[in-house]
Every structure is written in structure tokens, then in C-alpha cells.
């Protein structure tokens, strides 16, 4: 039986804390956050297999799980004339292999409480899967099977093609999709980053195309594997060797290169969508590449301007004027370059004034120093979001692989939080002047041309497009 009496040490502690517990606390005051940690990323180890596959290990024993992320350093930039190729390839990886048909693959992943999911981006294709660490061997076997042995069955290709064509048709009624596609085309020009799938390119993709794409790019010397979880490198490395060691390396083609168009002055690009009662607006320009040395400063800049509810665009267009439900900005950072855009959806009658206010906010953040109190809020927001994201194993795996994919310094993320928390008003203004330029921008609008065209003409020369994104006479 436990004693009902307190020890002398506990009695002393109770006597010390009792006055504090009864002290009056001013709950209207927000506690001051502590400083950003000097080091804010876990240590990782690296091993390269004899076939060239680079493996990154991060041990995390807080949960009895393991996450694997296999990344191929070839994405839609290699689609060529058949836009959609990388996307089709990734979509079919888990829909049947030479060892398992689609149903059996799904059944086995369900049995261990996991899914092997693949995603294609412009610079890379990734496969990610997580499970309890007792299923490490089975999970690796399933992932290796999907990556190395897909069969691209005709019936599965037909399903993906039908879904894609249906989605493309539906996108003609989605202003945000239309404006995003045209913006990419205008910002990137003839570079592969500006390409997008069309019914013609989707119809042209054959099974032989997918087999060839897979054979060319799915090679160990074009891949990295990140391991995050409660497993030791000594235990999991032999399993990785068993799953991927016999994967044969091959020569990988060089990435396609093309210059981005130079944006001089302002121009307006209006997608005519008859019947629209509101306008979808994007103000855009080319932006920095993913390995820009001032990436932390760019992210704090973006959140200050339009990264969320506390951004200036939101405060102006929604809170002050009531023209929109929300207005935001973003930087799309890719391997060979990127883009910046600020966006909003407004009523037809305030389309031109809303664009004017977006341009005004871009000008203001370049020309005026941001007050310390406002900037401090954004620093805290960015540091907090980053530190919380370290709980996500898949996100941690991606960051480790990003160091290799984008050529970042090996210690980039170790000091990331400190740099986010150290952005000064002067540094933010310098970053804004480097990456924002309201005088040389593209303005893309989706709306009813007869209602809004005249109001847009003072902003710059207007080109009108149909929903097929082709210029109209």
C-alpha cells in the first residue's frame, strides 16, 4: 500500500509552488516566444550502394514506424512533346507489376496498413510509403517492386487516360486552373516548365512510351532513397541491398534547357469566359531557383506580402476593401528557375482596382521598410511552421533529398530556423527589391471579356484568349 504521507522533499516543493499557483496571471498578455534554435534539423547518415543509389538515414525512435521515400531525379521536364508522360508513369507504378497485379498489390499494402504513393513534379518523381517498423522488409519489397517492375497494363493506362481527359474538360470551367496554365506558359515560354497536358498529348501517350520513359529514368544512379524512423542503419541496410542492390545503372540523359522569356513592362492576358460574374486574377513574373542563397528570406517576404491571413494582400483586398474572400502570393521554386505570383478572385466591377491594389502592395514592400512588430509576427509564424513540420517523416525525408536534388549546402536545414528568425527589416526590403518588380509583370485574368476588358486596358496591352488558351483575333 502506498503511504498517504508526503516526503520532506515534496513538502518543500509544495510550499514553494503554492504562492505561485495563487499569484494573479495576466492572461491578456501573449507569452514571448523563445529564440529560434541554432540547430533545427536531425543528423543524417549517407551510404551509396555499388549501383549508385544514394541512401540517407535519419533515425527517429519517437514512434515505432518507418518511412521510405524513393526519388527519381527526372520529372515532367523530360515529357518532351507528350506532356503528361511523367504523370502517367507515376500514376501506374502501383497498378500492377511483373510480380503482383493491381489487386494483389493493393491487398498487400492494405494488409500492412500502408500505401505506396507516387507523385510526379517538374524536377522529380517520388514514391513514398510508411508503416510500422515491424513491416520494414515487406514495405521495401513493395516499394522496390513498384519502382522497378511496373507493367503499365493497357487496361490501367486506358483508365488513367479517361480520367485525365475528363479532368482536362472539367478544367475549362475552373478559372484557377485556366489562369495557372496560361501563367506558366507565359512565364516559362518554350522551357519545359511551361508545358501542360492537352487532350492531344494525352491521347498520344502509348504503353511503349511509358516503358521507354521508365527504362530511361528509373535507374539507381538517378535516384536517392531516404529512410526516416525507428530503425537502425545496420538493420535496414541489408534489406535495402536485397530490394535495390541488383537494380542496374545506366546513362541518364541531360536535363533539357531553354531560356525563360524576358518580361519587360506590363501586359494583360485575358481569358474570355462568357457568363463569369467574377474575375480570377494573377500578377506574375519569373522568380528565383530553388537553390537561391536567400531562400529563408524569400519565404518570410512571401508570408509578409501574401502568405496567409496575416499577409498584406489579405488585409488590403479582403479586410479593407471587401473585394475578395482572400488574396495570396507564392514563389514556385524549381531546379532551373521559378516564378512569383499574387492572386485574388473578385467581382467583375472591381477587377481593375483589385489589380491596382496588388501592384501597390508589391511596390510598398519594396519601397518601405516593414515595421519590426509586423515582421516579428511573420518570423515567428515561419519558424513555428518549420519546427512543427519536423514531426512529419515524409517532409523530413523530402528535405534531405532536396539537398541533393537542388544542390543545397549539406548543412542548409541545420541553420534554417535561425535564418528564418533572423530576417531584419533591411534584409526583407533588399530581398523584395531583388525578386519583385511591379513595373515588369504579367497580369493574367479569367473573366467575361465584354464586362472587364475596357477597365484592363489602362494597365497594359491586352491579349484575349479562349478557354483553349489560344489567342483570339
Image (cartoon, grey):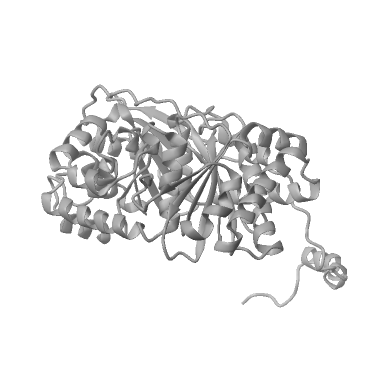
In the depicted structure, whether residue 443 falls above or below residue 78 = below
Q: Nearer the viewer, residue 124 or 411?
A: 124
Specify the quadrant of the image occupied by residue 80.
top left
Report x, y in % for residue 141.
24, 45
Q: In which quadrant of the rendered image does the C terminus lie?
A: top left
What residue is at 64 percent from the left and 41 percent from the top? 417
Q: Quadrant of the N terminus?
A: bottom right
Lateral position of residue 1 relative to residue 259, left or right: right
Q: Is residue 84 visible?
A: yes
Q: How many marks?
A: 0
Front residue of 257/285: it is 285
Left or right of 201 on screen, residue 395? right
Q: Is residue 424 visible?
A: no
Quarter holding residue 298: top right
Residue at 32% over, 56% down: 114
Residue shown at the point (35%, 45%) measured from the top left:
470
Give coordinates of residue 186: x percent, y percent.
Answer: 45, 38
Q: What is the x, y in percent for residue 347? A: 56, 64
Instruction: Residue 210 in the image: state x and y as whole percent.
Output: 19, 39
Q: Is residue 300 left or right of residue 74?
A: right
Amino acid at each position: 500500500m502506498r503511504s498517504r504521507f508526503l516526503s520532506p522533499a515534496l513538502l518543500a516543493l509544495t510550499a514553494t509552488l503554492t504562492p505561485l499557483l495563487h499569484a494573479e496571471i495576466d492572461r491578456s498578455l501573449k507569452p514571448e516566444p523563445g529564440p529560434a534554435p541554432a540547430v533545427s534539423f536531425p543528423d543524417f547518415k549517407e551510404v551509396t550502394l555499388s549501383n549508385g543509389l544514394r541512401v540517407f538515414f535519419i533515425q527517429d525512435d519517437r514512434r515505432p514506424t518507418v518511412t521510405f521515400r524513393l526519388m527519381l531525379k527526372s520529372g515532367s521536364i523530360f515529357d518532351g512533346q507528350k506532356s503528361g508522360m511523367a504523370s502517367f508513369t507515376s500514376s501506374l507504378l502501383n497498378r500492377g507489376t511483373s510480380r503482383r497485379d493491381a489487386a494483389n498489390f493493393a491487398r498487400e499494402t492494405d494488409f500492412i496498413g500502408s500505401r505506396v504513393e507516387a507523385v510526379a513534379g517538374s524536377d522529380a518523381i517520388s514514391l513514398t510509403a510508411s508503416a510500422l517498423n515491424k513491416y520494414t522488409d515487406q514495405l521495401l519489397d513493395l516499394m522496390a517492386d513498384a519502382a522497378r517492375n511496373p507493367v503499365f497494363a493497357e487496361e490501367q493506362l486506358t483508365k488513367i487516360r479517361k480520367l485525365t481527359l475528363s479532368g482536362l474538360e472539367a478544367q475549362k470551367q475552373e478559372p484557377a486552373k485556366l489562369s495557372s496554365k496560361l501563367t506558366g506558359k507565359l512565364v516559362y515560354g518554350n522551357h519545359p516548365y511551361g508545358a501542360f497536358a492537352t487532350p492531344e498529348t494525352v491521347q498520344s501517350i502509348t504503353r511503349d512510351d511509358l516503358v521507354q520513359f521508365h527504362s530511361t529514368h528509373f535507374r539507381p544512379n538517378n535516384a536517392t532513397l531516404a529512410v526516416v524512423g525507428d530503425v537502425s542503419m545496420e538493420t535496414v541496410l541489408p534489406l535495402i541491398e536485397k530490394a535495390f542492390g541488383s537494380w542496374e545503372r545506366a546513362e541518364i540523359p541531360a536535363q533539357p534547357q531553354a531560356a525563360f522569356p524576358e518580361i519587360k513592362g506590363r501586359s494583360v492576358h485575358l481569358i474570355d469566359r462568357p457568363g463569369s460574374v467574377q474575375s480570377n486574377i494573377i500578377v506574375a513574373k519569373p522568380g528565383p531557383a530553388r537553390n537561391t542563397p536567400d531562400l529563408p528570406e524569400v519565404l518570410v517576404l512571401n508570408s509578409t506580402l501574401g502568405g496567409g491571413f496575416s499577409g498584406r494582400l489579405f488585409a488590403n483586398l479582403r479586410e479593407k476593401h471587401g473585394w475578395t474572400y482572400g488574396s495570396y502570393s507564392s514563389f514556385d521554386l524549381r531546379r532551373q528557375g521559378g516564378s512569383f505570383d499574387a492572386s485574388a478572385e473578385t467581382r467583375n466591377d472591381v477587377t481593375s482596382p483589385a489589380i491596382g491594389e496588388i501592384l501597390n502592395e508589391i511596390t510598398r514592400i519594396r519601397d518601405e521598410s516593414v515595421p519590426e512588430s509586423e515582421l516579428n509576427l511573420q518570423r515567428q509564424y515561419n519558424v513555428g511552421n518549420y519546427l512543427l513540420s519536423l514531426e512529419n517523416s515524409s517532409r523530413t525525408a523530402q528535405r534531405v533529398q532536396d539537398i541533393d536534388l537542388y544542390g543545397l549546402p549539406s548543412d542548409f536545414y541545420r541553420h534554417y530556423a535561425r535564418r528564418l528568425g533572423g530576417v531584419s527589416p533591411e534584409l526583407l526590403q533588399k530581398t523584395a527589391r531583388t525578386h519583385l518588380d511591379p513595373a515588369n509583370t504579367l497580369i493574367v485574368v479569367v473573366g467575361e471579356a465584354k464586362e472587364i476588358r475596357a477597365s484592363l486596358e489602362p494597365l497594359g496591352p491586352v491579349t484575349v484568349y479562349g478557354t483553349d488558351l489560344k489567342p483570339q483575333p
